[in-house]
Image: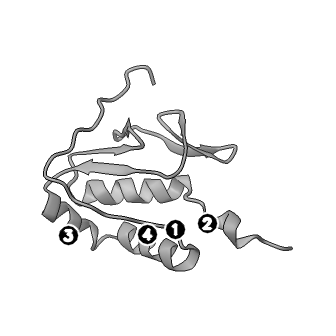
Amino acid sequence: RDVDPAADARVQDGDLQRVANGLWSSGAEAVAVNGQRLTAATAIRSAGGAVLVNFRPLSPPYRVEAIGSPNALAASFALTPAARWLQALQDQYGIGVQVTTAEALDLPALDAQR
């Protein structure tokens, strides 16, 4: 069976789950993906080739944002299995990952209509 490597080079729901869990385990106080605020009960799933967060389809590129101590959060996250997973995605599939810190960040409130 022929497999197109480019087809596997998409960010999957499990990739975003790993990143979110890695951020929380690193001390993040709040996390959002493409403007969708995450909670402990948030479902990050795929359906029909789309990634859904809070039952809303998201489009790449995916932007994951987290609130926490900028330097401590970045340093702690770099030591997580999620960070190693992201590095593997970069190495194997060329998926771009950029980590930046900021002194201030506003995340959206949880959408009550989910």
Residue 73 falls in which quadrant of the image? bottom left
Query: Could you tell me residue 46's position as x and y percent?
Result: 60, 46
Say which quadrant the C terminus sits in. Answer: top left
**Residue 93's quadrant in the figure?**
bottom right
Q: Nearer the viewer, mark 1 or mark 4?
A: 1
Residue tagged 1: 95
Q: On the image, numbered disc 2 is attached to which residue?
A: 9
Q: Earlier in the sequence, mark 3 or mark 2?
A: 2
CB atoms at circles 3 and 2 under 8 Å apart? no
The answer for how far apart the CA atoms under marks 1 and 4 are is: 8 Å
Label 4 neighbour load within 10 Å: few <14, some 14-19, many 20+: some
Foreground pick, 78 / 34: 34
Cβ atoms at labels 3 and 4 below 8 Å apart: no
Q: Amino acid at mark 4?
A: Leu
- Dot 3 or dot 4: first in sequence order is 3
According to the image, label 4 marks what residue?
86
Q: Secondary structure at mark 1?
A: loop
Kindly indicate whether the residue at mark 4 contacts the one at mark 2 (C-beta within 8 angstroms): no
State yes or no: discs 1 and 2 in contact (Cβ < 8 Å): yes
User: For the point 28% across and 71% down, which residue is it?
Assistant: 78
How far apart marks 1 and 2 lie (CA) works out to 7 Å
* Residue 29 spot, x, y in % from top left: 20, 46
10 Å crowding of disc 2: few (<14), some (14-19), many (20+): some
Give the left or right position of residue 73, taking residue 89 as reference.
Answer: left
**Kind of element beneath mark 3:** helix
Q: Residue at x 22, y 52 (%)?
A: 28
Residue 37: name its quadrant.
Answer: top left
For label 3, the crowd category at 10 Å Cα-Cα, with few meaning under 14, some 14 to 19 and many 20 or more, is few
Q: Residue at x 49, y 74 (%)?
A: 90
Q: Nearer the viewer, residue 85 or 108?
A: 108
In the image, residue 73 sits, relative to residue 37, either above or below, namely below
